[in-house]
Structures are given as structure tokens and as C-alpha cells.
Amino acid sequence: MDERGFELWGLPWRAEVTFEELSAHIHPSDRDRVHSAFAATRAVLGSYETDFRIMIGEEVRWISARGQGEDVGIVGRTMFGIFLDVTGRKQAEEGNELLAGEMSHRVKNLLAIASGLTAITSRTAPNTQDMARELT
């Protein structure tokens, strides 16, 4: 890993780092999935990409790991690939999901109100023209 990779993982720079050392920083909820994904890379032909969280103290960072999953990219115990910090993108996605959920909730509430008003108006209006006039 280069110096920036060590910074990303919150580790002091040195010549080598093991998968086990990096795994210690992977979020507990993602650890099994990431271990399985990396174990499967030797069988995968072509590129791979997986997103996961790492813990740097109390800080959570999202990492996107990308590389070649075939044996050609593995020399001894060395793998080639990149780690991208996608924390900002993931936070934006989470914000969008919260916003979409809130908007959905509000739209459902408005539709429930409209449905209720329509039901009440339909009971008292003598015909559809009067009902339409009362609803507008």
C-alpha cells in the first residue's frame, strides 16, 4: 500500500501490511462479508469491487476496494488493487434514502387525508357534481 492507503486506514506507513491487520479495522457488521469477498477473489475472473466500512477509533469510513480477482494479480501473498474513500458518497446516499422515506411518509399522509375527505364528502353530497364542487 502507498502512504495515502495507510492514511486512509489510519495506520502508520511501513513497507508492508497484512490482510489480517487491515481486517482488524473493518466494521464488525461487514467483516464476514468482506472476508468472503476477498477469499473468493482467487476464483473470480476479471475485476472485483466491494464497499465496506472501516473503523478508525470512533470514526466510520466507507471504503470501495477494487482490483483484479484472478491469480495473475496475486504474486505470493501480494494483491494489487486500490482503496477509494467513498465516505462522502455513502453519507449522501444515506441522506437521500432518509429524505425519500420522509417524503414517502408525508405523501401517504396527504393521500390518507384526501381519501378521508373524499369519503366524508361522498356521504353528504347528493350527486357527483356537488361532490366535486365541495372537494375543490
Image (cartoon, grey):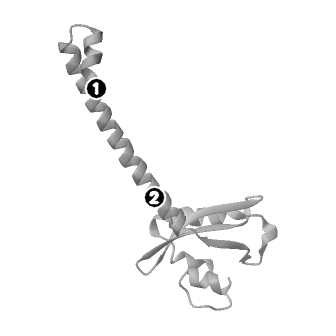
Residue at image x 45%, y 58%? 94
Q: Are marks 1 and 2 in contact (CB under 8 Å)?
A: no
112 up-or-down from 54: above or below: above
- Tag 2: amino acid: Glu
Quadrant location of the C terminus?
top left
129 up-or-down from 64: above or below: above
Among the 4 quarters of the image, the one containing residue 20: bottom right
Among the 4 quarters of the image, the one containing residue 120: top left
Numbered marks: total: 2
Residue 75 in view (yes/no):
yes
- The picture places residue 9, in percent across and down from the top left corner, at 56, 80
Q: Residue furthest top?
A: 127
100 horizontally vs 40: left or right: left
- The picture places residue 121, in percent across and down from the top left corner, at 21, 18
Q: Earlier in the sequence, mark 1 or mark 2?
A: 2
- In this rendering, the label closer to the viewer, 1 or 2: 1
48 up-or-down from 76: above or below: above
Residue at image x 24%, y 20%? 134
Q: How many angstroms separate mark 1 from mark 2 (CA)? A: 31 Å
Query: For mark 1, what is the residue?
Result: 115
77 horizontally vs 97: left or right: right
Q: Nearer the viewer, residue 53 or 26?
A: 53
Residue 94 is marked as: 2
6 horizontally vs 70: left or right: left
Residue at image x 61%, y 91%? 13
Q: Secondary structure at mark 1?
A: helix
Q: Nearer the viewer, residue 86 or 69?
A: 86
Q: Nearer the viewer, residue 73 or 124?
A: 124
Residue 17 in view (yes/no):
no
Q: Residue furthest right?
A: 72
- The picture places residue 101, in percent across and down from the top left corner, at 39, 47
Quadrant location of the N terminus?
bottom right
